[in-house]
Image (spheres, rainbow, N blue to C red):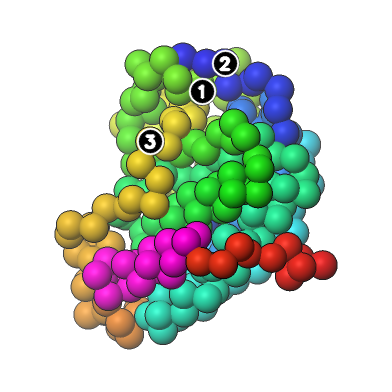
Amino acid sequence: MLPATTPCRSLFIGSHPGQELMVFGWMVENKPDVFILTDGSGARDRPRIDSSRRVLEAAGIVPGGLFGGHADKALYGHLVGHNGSFFVDLAEMVTNHILGRGIQLVVAPAADGYNPVQDALRLVVDAACRLAAQHGVRNLENRGVHLQARPEEGMSDRLSRVVILEDDTLARKVELARSFQGMEAVTENLLDTFGTEAYRVEVLRRVTRPLMVPCVEPDYEKHGAERVAAGLYPTLIRYADHLAPVNWALRSHLEGPAYSLARAA
């Protein structure tokens, strides 16, 4: 495995507040630029982005330009409304940041079929990395963090970037996790199952299949049906109806006319 702390200019992009906490030790060492797509308000309109701000402050990082700028309901609206241009524009914005900042390593949650916005973001990040390559960026690392995996999974891959937290950093991470708004139950369940060691290992895995996300009965289709039945969301998100069009829009953009950086001006 590779040392996760090898110095390079990096970018972390999360779909929801709290995901950055899972790479807290890596952030402390590398000081990446950090984008977070949504405010974490969920179906009940209760934003959690201030907790992410405290995590970044503890890591010595200033939030990036994209930091909780979209409500969760708005993102679901873009998916349901087949607004592929929103995700294409997002990929262009990420690409411009990669080019403008000389980013060498991009880290984002892996697609795991658990949340459709998270999977859509993975498609966006993969597309942005390819767009950057089209503009001459070489050796850009595209890595994923598997949020639903056991902490030690992925360590056996010799090309994974792995950081193992020292006790003081681990203690800070656990404290931040316990105080993170809206994640109390998840944190306590993780600690009850694995203990504090659940937060010690951070694995940044290489993305070997870009622009590929779970499409056969992903969890969000099963859990989404329950949320629709409870009246929390009006429409069931499905891969075929809502994620596949995002993938198609991004792939079409990659294969279309050369995209212009003028939009970033």
Please say if the residues under marks 3 and 2 sit with CB atoms less than 8 Å apart.
no
Residue 97, placed above or below residue 10 = below
Q: Is residue 149 left or right of residue 251?
A: left
Say which residue appears at 33% left-offset and 30% top-offset.
150
Tell me which numbered mark, 3 or 1, is placed earlier along the sequence.
Answer: 1
Residue type (three-letter) at the residue carrying disc 3: Thr
Tag nearer the camera, 3 or 1 = 3
Please give the residue where the numbered disc 2 appears in the rendered image. Answer: 3
Residue 240 covered by magenta stretch: yes
| The C terminus: image quadrant | bottom right
Q: CA distance from mark 3 to mark 1?
A: 14 Å
Kind of residue at badge 2:
Pro
The residue under label 1 is which amino acid type? Arg
Q: Kindly state the secondary structure of the residue where label 3 is placed.
A: loop
Label 3, on which residue? 208
Give the label, 3 or 2, closer to the camera.
Answer: 3
Task: Give the residues drawn in magenta, as a range.
Answer: 237-255
Task: Name the residue at 44% across, 56% down.
Answer: 123
Residue 7: image quadrant is top right
